[in-house]
Image (spheres, grey):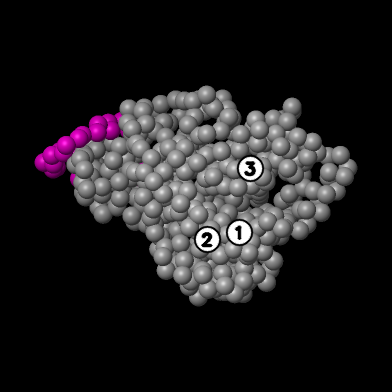
C-alpha cells in the first residue's frame, strides 16, 4: 500500500482548521505536521494547495436495493457506493430489514450477502425491526455484540413496518439494557392512512396530496410520543429524517430537559419543498418521500436546528426509484408512488453550498456530515476525522470549483436528479478510502469489493 503525503491544503475537522500536511501509511493517518517542519518521504504526493482536506463523509441513512411497494430501490450496493464516492462519502450505514414473521438474523444475513464484495467504500448496517416479539428482543442483544448497534422502528406504514406503542416500548427497554440506539420514523401512520383513504375517495390523487395527508402535526405528535416512550424506557432516541418545524421544537424541548434525544435531517428538506411536489405532469412524483417535503418556511427551522445542535446529523435517506417504470406506478393514486429520493452523491456538495450561503460554518459542515454521524453510530475516531490512527478516508475538496447538478452527469443509478440544474460552488477532487484512491483527477479509479464491512461500537453521545 502506497505511503501518501497530502500537502499544502487546509485540513478541516469538526474541531479545527489547520494548514498542515497529512501523512498516510498502511491505510491510516499516521501524522500531521506544519509544512516545512518535517522531512517526510512518500510514494505518492497529492498537492492540495488552495484546497480543503476533509474527512470522508459518513452517510448514516441509505437504502440500497431496498424492496418497497412491489419494486426495489434502483441503486445496488455497487452503484450506490460508487456514487457515494463520487460525492466524497466514504462510509455508508445501510438498513437491513427483518421480514414480519422472520428473524433479525435472516434479514441481516440477506443484507450481508447483498453488500459483500460489491461496495466501493466501507459500509455498516442498522437493523429495521418489523416484528417486535420475545425472540427478536433477544436477538437485539446478539446483534449489538457483533457490531450492529442501532435498531430502526416505524410509527408509520401499518401492515408493513409499523410497531405499536407497546412494541416500541419493549424494544426501547431492550436497547436501554444492551446499549443499542433506537432510531425512529416518527409519523402517526394510523391517522395518515385515514387521511390517505379520504383524499383518494375525494379524487385528490396527484403527488402533491402525498404531502397534504402526511401532516406536520402528525410528525410532531409522533416525535413527542417517541420521546416520551424513550423517557419511560430510559433509552436514547434518534429521530430520522426530521422535516418540520414543530418536530424540531419537540426535540429541542427534550434536549433542554437533558434527555438523550437526537435528530437527523436530510438535504431534500433543506433545499426542496412542497413546490416540487406540486410540479405538473406528474413530475411531483420525483419528490415523493416520507416524511414528506414541507412548505419552504420550515427550512429556516431546520437550519437553525443544525446550528443550535438540536439536530446533529445530515444524512440522505438515499432510496432512489426511477421516474420511468417505478415512480409511474402511482399515476392516478399517489399512495402507490414508491417513497424515496436519490441523494447519496449530492450531500457533501449541498452542505458545502450551505457554507457558501452562510447557513453553517466550515467546521459545522464537517461535524454534521462526518464526525457526528461517526460518533452517533460508534465509528469514531476510526471514521469522521483526520487524526493519527484514523482510517485514511480523506477528500481533497476544491471550494471554488463550480458545477451544475444534473442527471446527465451524476453517477447514481436513477433517471432524474432531485436538484436538476442547481448551480453550486465546490467539488470533490480526490477521494481516498483507507488510503486507496477511489476518485482521482475527476475519474473513478476504485473497484467493487474494496469497501469493507465495519462493525460498530455504541453511540458515543450517551
Label of residue 106 in the image: 2
Residue 436 counted in the magenta span: no
Q: Nearer the viewer, residue 358 or 33?
A: 33
Seen as rendered, the residue at the extreme right is: 202
Q: Residues within 10 Å of mark 1 (few under 14, many from 20)?
A: some
Decide: is 186 above or below 443: below
Q: Is residue 161 rendered to the left or right of residue 438?
A: right
Magenta residue check for 38 = yes
Q: Residues within 10 Å of mark 3 (few under 14, many from 20)?
A: some
Give the structural element (helix, strand or loop) at label 3.
strand
Which of the 4 quarters of the picture holds residue 319?
Answer: top right
Q: Earlier in the sequence, mark 2 or mark 1?
A: 1
Q: Which residue is mark 3?
A: 71
Evaluate whether residue 155 shows in this view.
no
How would you classify the magenta stretch by its main secondary structure? loop
Task: Tell me, for residue 393, which label it has, or none.
Answer: none
Mark identifier at residue 99: 1
Q: From mark 3 to mark 2, how far is it between C-alphas? A: 20 Å
Q: At 35% from the left edge and 38% from the top edge, which residue is drawn?
A: 447
Quick one: label 2, few (<14), some, or many (20+) residues within 10 Å? some
Please give left or right for residue 284 compared with residue 413 in the image: right
Contact between labelled residues 1 and 2, with CB atoms less than 8 Å apart: yes
Q: What are the residue bounds of the magenta stretch?
A: 33-56
The answer to whether 68 is drawn above or below residue 355 in the figure is below
Tell me: 240 left or right of 88. Answer: right
Percent x, y of residue 445: 33, 32
The quarter of the rendered structure image containing the N terminus is top left
Q: Residue 201 in the image: x percent, y percent?
A: 87, 45
Amino acid at each position: 500500500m502506497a505511503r501518501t503525503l497530502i500537502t499544502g491544503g487546509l485540513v478541516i475537522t469538526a474541531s479545527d482548521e489547520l494548514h498542515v500536511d497529512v501523512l498516510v501509511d498502511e491505510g491510516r493517518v499516521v501524522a500531521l505536521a506544519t509544512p516545512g517542519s518535517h522531512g517526510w518521504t512518500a510514494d505518492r504526493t497529492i498537492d492540495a494547495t488552495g484546497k480543503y482536506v476533509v474527512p470522508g463523509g459518513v452517510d448514516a441513512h441509505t437504502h440500497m436495493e431496498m424492496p418497497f411497494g412491489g419494486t426495489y430501490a434502483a441503486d445496488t450496493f455497487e452503484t450506490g457506493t460508487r456514487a457515494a464516492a463520487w460525492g466524497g462519502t466514504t462510509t455508508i450505514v445501510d438498513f437491513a430489514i427483518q421480514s414480519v414473521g422472520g428473524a433479525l438474523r435472516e434479514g441481516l444475513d440477506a443484507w450481508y450477502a447483498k453488500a459483500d464484495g460489491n461496495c466501493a467504500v466501507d459500509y455498516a448496517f442498522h437493523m429495521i425491526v418489523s416484528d417486535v416479539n420475545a425472540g427478536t428482543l433477544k436477538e437485539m442483544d446478539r446483534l449489538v455484540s457483533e457490531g450492529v448497534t442501532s435498531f430502526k422502528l416505524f410509527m408509520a406504514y401499518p401492515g408493513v413496518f409499523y410497531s405499536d406503542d407497546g412494541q416500541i416500548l419493549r424494544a426501547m427497554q431492550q436497547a436501554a439494557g444492551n446499549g443499542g440506539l433506537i432510531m425512529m420514523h416518527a409519523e402517526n401512520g394510523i391517522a395518515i392512512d385515514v387521511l390517505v383513504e379520504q383524499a383518494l375517495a375525494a379524487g385528490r390523487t396527484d403527488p402533491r396530496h402525498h404531502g397534504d395527508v402526511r401532516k406536520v402535526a402528525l410528525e410532531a405528535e409522533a416525535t413527542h410520543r417517541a420521546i416520551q416512550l424513550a423517557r419511560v424506557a430510559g433509552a436514547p432516541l434518534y429521530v430520522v429524517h426530521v422535516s418540520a418545524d414543530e418536530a424540531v421544537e419537540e426535540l429541542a424541548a427534550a434536549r433542554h430537559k437533558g434527555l438523550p434525544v437526537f435528530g437527523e435531517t436530510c438535504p431534500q428538506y433543506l433545499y426542496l419543498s412542497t413546490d416540487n411536489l406540486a410540479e405538473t405532469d406528474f413530475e411531483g412524483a420525483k419528490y415523493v418521500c416520507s416524511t414528506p417535503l414541507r412548505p419552504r418556511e420550515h427550512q429556516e427551522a431546520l437550519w437553525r436546528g443544525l446550528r443550535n445542535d438540536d439536530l446533529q446529523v445530515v444524512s440522505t435517506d438515499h432510496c432512489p426509484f426511477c421516474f420511468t417504470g417505478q415512480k409511474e406506478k402511482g399515476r392516478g393514486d399517489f399512495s402507490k408512488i414508491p417513497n424515496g429520493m436519490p441523494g447519496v452523491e449530492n450531500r457533501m456538495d449541498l452542505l458545502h453550498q450551505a457554507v457558501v450561503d452562510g447557513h453553517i460554518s466550515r467546521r459545522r459542515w464537517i461535524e454534521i456530515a462526518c464526525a457526528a454521524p461517526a460518533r452517533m453510530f460508534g465509528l469514531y475516531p476510526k471514521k469522521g476525522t483526520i487524526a493519527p490512527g484514523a482510517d485514511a478516508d480523506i477528500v481533497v475538496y476544491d471550494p471554488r470549483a463550480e458545477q451544475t447538478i444534473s442527471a446527465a452527469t451524476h453517477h447514481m443509478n436513477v433517471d432524474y436528479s432531485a436538484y436538476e440544474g442547481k448551480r453550486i460552488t465546490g467539488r470533490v477532487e480526490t477521494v481516498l478510502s483507507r488510503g486507496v484512491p477511489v476518485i482521482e483527477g475527476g475519474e473513478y479509479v476504485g473497484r467493487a469489493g474494496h469497501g469493507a464491512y465495519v462493525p460498530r461500537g455504541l453511540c458515543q453521545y450517551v
